[in-house]
């Protein structure tokens, strides 16, 4: 669908400062064409500034920005072949849905009838072809979001940018719209850069995630890699829920290590950590809970909190290692606060975190 086809995006040691404060500091990455890459991180980490630098809404103080191999560092937003879907949708309230979507082609000089045909094509793509005559105020939040996507797509950009696109939607609608965005990205072969602070959203939609912290990249990789092999305590704690517990590496052989966690010895990849004090990240679903003491070594604990969430139970269990957060799929006979419990470690979701 694209005029020029999907493009790569490359940052080469890009820095953006506001006075003495660096919002983005010497950041380098490459986003491959036809991929959906998410910039993920807490508020103030630099992800939205990075998106603005791609769009041309912010100008870099240092470094180079390339789109499709062309240096766009000094180009204005109007001269870059990108479109952005804003968090607020930014729809014109006095225009119909069709007029909103046709606005970009119209102001770029395309005759009105042709602009409307282009707009209708994109409304068909997002499933809103029957709502072209309505005003934005007559649409649901999810429908407004899709109008904003259609308006961005009608210009057939090389790169499509999303700034926190689901933050105004309720939980059920968020899931449906993120699936719509992912389907469109694949169907139209788009390069998409997507900003969110929501870890589940990032894991669900991304080919690759760039985690940012304090204006720099903390880790970049496929969702599964970041979840199962976080490169730092920050990433382990930020991507999903992780129990970070004290451990000791007692022996290293090849890529593996014997890791002591409480009274349990685990065989794990050492990931470059030397013998001695270490940290282990254990995902809540990798902690196996039982009401009876198993025959193998296990952590003894007391259930401090229990919550029923329909498909699973969530427990806080007080142990010698501290309070551990446990997700248990067994909901028929839940443990109650005050009950004794024992925890074993699964053979997945448990990793040494480099210090």
Image (spheres, helix red, strand yellow):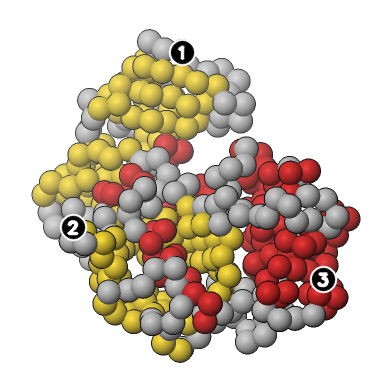
Q: Nearer the viewer, mark 1 or mark 3?
A: 3
Where is residue 287 shown, x and y percent of the image? 40, 35
Mark 2 / mark 1, whichever is N-terminal? 2
Residue at the (23%, 30%) spot, across then down: 321
Structural distance between the alpha carbons of marks 3 and 2: 60 Å
* Depth order, front residue of 38/88: 88
Would you say 304 lies left or right of 194 here?
A: left
Mark 3 / mark 2, whichever is N-terminal? 3
Would you say 267 lies left or right of 4 here?
A: left
Would you say 102 lies left or right of 232 here?
A: right
Q: Is residue 229 above or below residue 330?
A: below
Circle 1 Cα neighbour tier, 10 Å, few/some/many (<14 / 14–19 / ≥20): some
Instruction: Locate the N terminus and report the quarter of the image it occupies.
Output: bottom right
Where is residue 179 shown, x and y percent of the image? 66, 54
User: Which residue is the extreme one toward the bottom?
Assistant: 70
Where is residue 86 shown, x and y percent of the image? 56, 57
Structural distance between the alpha carbons of marks 2 and 1: 38 Å
* Depth order, front residue of 51/76: 76
Structural distance between the alpha carbons of marks 1 and 3: 61 Å
Question: Which image quadrant is residue 245 in?
Answer: top left
Q: Is residue 338 visible?
A: yes
Q: Badge 2 is on which residue?
A: 273
Cβ atoms at labels 1 and 3 below 8 Å apart: no
Mark 1 / mark 3, whichever is N-terminal? 3
Q: Badge 3 is on which residue?
A: 116
| Secondary structure category for the residue under label 2 | loop
Q: Badge 1 is on which residue?
A: 336
* Depth order, front residue of 189/116: 116
Where is residue 248 shown, x and y percent of the image? 16, 44
């Amino acid at each position: 669908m694209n005029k020029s086809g999907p493009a790569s995006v490359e940052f080469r040691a890009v820095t953006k400062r506001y006075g003495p404060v660096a919002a983005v500091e010497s950041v380098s990455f490459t986003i491959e064409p036809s991929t959906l890459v998410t910039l993920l991180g807490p508020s103030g980490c630099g992800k939205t500034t990075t998106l603005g630098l791609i769009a041309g809404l912010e100008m870099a103080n240092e470094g180079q920005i390339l789109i499709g191999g062309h240096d766009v560092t000094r180009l204005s937003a109007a001269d870059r072949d990108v479109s952005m879907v804003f968090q607020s949708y930014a729809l014109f309230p006095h225009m119909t849905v069709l007029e909103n979507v046709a606005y970009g082609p119209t102001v770029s000089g395309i005759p009105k009838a042709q602009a409307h045909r282009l707009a209708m094509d994109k409304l068909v793509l997002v499933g809103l072809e029957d709502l072209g005559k309505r005003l934005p105020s007559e649409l649901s939040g999810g429908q407004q979001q899709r109008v904003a996507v259609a308006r961005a797509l009608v210009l057939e950009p090389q790169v499509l940018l999303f700034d926190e696109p689901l933050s105004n939607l309720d939980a059920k609608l968020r899931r449906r719209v993120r699936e719509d965005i992912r389907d469109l990205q694949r169907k139209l072969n788009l390069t998409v850069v997507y900003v969110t602070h929501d870890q589940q959203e990032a894991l669900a939609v991304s080919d690759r995630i760039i985690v940012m912290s304090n204006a720099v990249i903390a880790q970049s990789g496929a969702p599964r890699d970041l979840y199962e092999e976080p490169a730092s305590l920050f990433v382990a704690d930020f991507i999903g829920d992780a129990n970070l517990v004290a451990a000791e590496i007692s022996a290293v052989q090849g890529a593996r290590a014997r890791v002591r966690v409480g009274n349990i010895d685990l065989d794990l990849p050492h990931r470059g950590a030397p013998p001695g004090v270490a940290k282990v990240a254990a995902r809540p679903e990798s902690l196996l809970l039982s009401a009876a003491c198993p025959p193998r070594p296990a952590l003894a604990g007391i259930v401090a909190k229990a919550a029923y969430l329909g498909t699973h139970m969530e427990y806080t269990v007080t142990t010698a290692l501290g309070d551990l957060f446990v997700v248990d799929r067994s909901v028929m006979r839940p443990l109650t606060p005050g009950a004794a419990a024992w925890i074993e470690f699964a053979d997945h979701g448990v990793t040494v975190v480099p210090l």
